[in-house]
Image: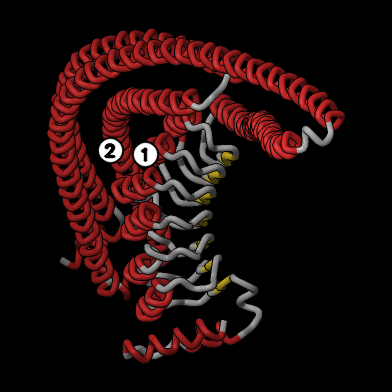
Amino acid sequence: MEDFRRTYLRLCKEGGVEPQESVVAQLQENRTVQGSRLDLSGQSLSADTCSVLARAFEKDTAFTEVSLSDCMLSEEGAKVLLTGLFGNTTVKVLDLKGNNLRSKGAEVLGKLLARNKTLRRLVLEWNALGVWDEAFSLFCEGLASNNVLTQLDLRNNQINHHGASELALALKRNNTVEVLDLRWNNIGLLGGRSLLEAVQKNKSIVQLEMAGNNIPSDTLRALEQTTSHNSDRQSTLRENHSRTQVLSKEIHILKEEKGRQFLSLMETIDRQRDEMGRSSRSTSIQISQLQEALNERKSAVNSLTAKVQMTEAALALSEQKNHNMGQLLTRLKTEKEEQRERQNRERKKEQEDSVLREGKLLREIQNLTENNSQLRNKVEEMERRCKSQQQQIFELKQELTNSTAELKLRLAQSEDRLEMEKRRSKQALDDMDSLRQKEVEHVNRHLEESERALQERIFKLEGQRIQLEEELSKAKAVCVTERAQAEEELGRVRAQVRLEEQEHVSSLEEKLRSVRSSLQEVQLHCSQQKQTISELQVKNSQQSIEMDSLRRRIEELQQELSGKDQEKVAEVSRVRVELQEQIGHLHAERTAQGGLKEKISALEREIKVLSSSHREVLLDKESEMSSMLEKLRLREAEIQRMREDEAQRASYLQSAILTYVQGSPLGHYSSPKK
């Protein structure tokens, strides 16, 4: 913690930036950082402090968790701070709750997800990432290319159905996100369906929160079922992985035991050879000893022959001894010959056994090589077919891009027309409001002038009114009531006209909304078709990867078979069974590819039908727009008539007031003075 504070202060001095006192105080407190956690939540960080922190994060720190919630980050500050985390390899948890991140923040977050390889959990609650569709699509592209993130929190981000469809496309490509929180957004029915399709294809999502999104209960149930199925699948995969590890360990142990047995056999053979050598050495030593004894006896015989004359008895004894020694020598020679014959027979038997073993191994190796050549031929045929299918998919892509471009041009033209008509209608309504205001002001001025004239006459005739005050008060009361009635009638007429105009404008807006919703549905259908094509491409790529894995497996089997003995025949048969199963899977995948081709043809037909139906819809909408223009013209004529009627009513009221005033007693008293 002290090292990070020092680096912060040093970078502030190098950049010529004054260190923020609240950040320094927060770093000095031991409670803010516990172990490997950096907590700056609630601190309003400026752009300069964000740049300094980004430079500090570029170097690997000791923090694995960073909390920047409710920091009121600006667009530039968030961009600089997140760029500093692109190459960081220590931060695993990032909290950006309540920072009101918008378009630039979404773009930088997408780049962060695409480049960072250590971030595991990202909290983006209470932001506005889903307001701009283009920026949120860039965020979704970064999420699709990420292969490290496991938890993502997007609560209260104003994500609509378009953003949900982009997020669904990203989830189809991502295989690491396990927990996703999308509560309290505006995803709706279409977004829920697209997310359901994505979760059905993505098998890594185990927990998905979708409350408060205006999604029907059946889609929510389907999402829960798919997530539970994914969790069960993950558990089964883990169990299978553990079982495969146990089996691989057992196979390794068996291999080691077989190697030990082979080594023990070789050791016994070496011992037998050593014993044979020792026995031959001992026999050679005995023969040499016998030869020495014979030499000694010969010398004794020579000495005895010299002494023959002296002792004949000694000669007889020596002859007997010589005869006995000759018998012993013959016996030893016969024993040596028998031992040599036995050794030769044993060697011949061992050579014959080794020749038979080598012949069997060569036959098995030839059979395996033939099977491998057949499998290689099949693999080459499958690759050729995959290439042809990829070419067909590329052609379909081009056709789809052309059709989508045409539809987009037509949609843009229709939107321009709708905007022009909106402007015209708004201008007409503004002109009508200004004319009404002018007419009302004119009527009020006329009434005020008439009131002023009456007051002047009343002031002139004050002397005469002393006698007739009661009658004048009654006349005034009658005039006030009539004036209130006239004003009430004018207010009613105005309210009726405004209500009629509001109803007309609301009907026009509803029609425009219906047109936009139909256009959005068309765009969604096109995006769904694009998704199906991308899925087909992914399947083809998976098949090619499986073919490469099969090739590698065949090569590994060849290497393993070259060094095995007769005891590994059972393993070879097991491998053959596995290869046959894989061949059966390949045949099943061929049939699936045929079904995919049929689906592609059906999709092409549907695209043609939809293009024709879209053309008819556009023609219908143009006819409706022309009818709406005619209705607007008729409405303007009716409004002009209403204005004329209001002018006539005002003139009638004015004339009635004047006649009433002239017919009142005031008029009678004023006439003799004149």
Instruction: Residue 65: give x, y in percent of width and height.
Output: 55, 65
Disc 1, disc 2: CB below 8 Å?
no
Which comes sooner in the sequence, label 1 or label 2? 1
- Name the residue: 47% across, 39% down: 175
- Name the residue: 19% across, 40% down: 422
Q: Residue furthest front?
A: 309
- The quadrant where residue 450 appears: bottom left
Residue 181: mark: none
Q: Image height check: is 101 above or below 323?
A: below
Instruction: Residue 335: give x, y in percent of width and height.
Output: 72, 20
Q: Residue furthest right?
A: 313
Q: Residues within 10 Å of mark 1 (few under 14, many from 20)?
A: many
Camera-side residue of 112 and 168: 112
Residue 166: mark: 1
- The quadrant where residue 227 appears: top right
Colouring used for the render: secondary structure
Q: Residues within 10 Å of mark 2 (few under 14, many from 20)?
A: some
Amino acid type of the residue that numbered disc 2 sits on in the rendered structure: Val
- Name the residue: 64% across, 20% down: 340
Camera-side residue of 651 and 443: 443
Disc 1 to disc 2, C-alpha distance: 33 Å
Which residue does the numbered mark 2 point to in the structure image?
505
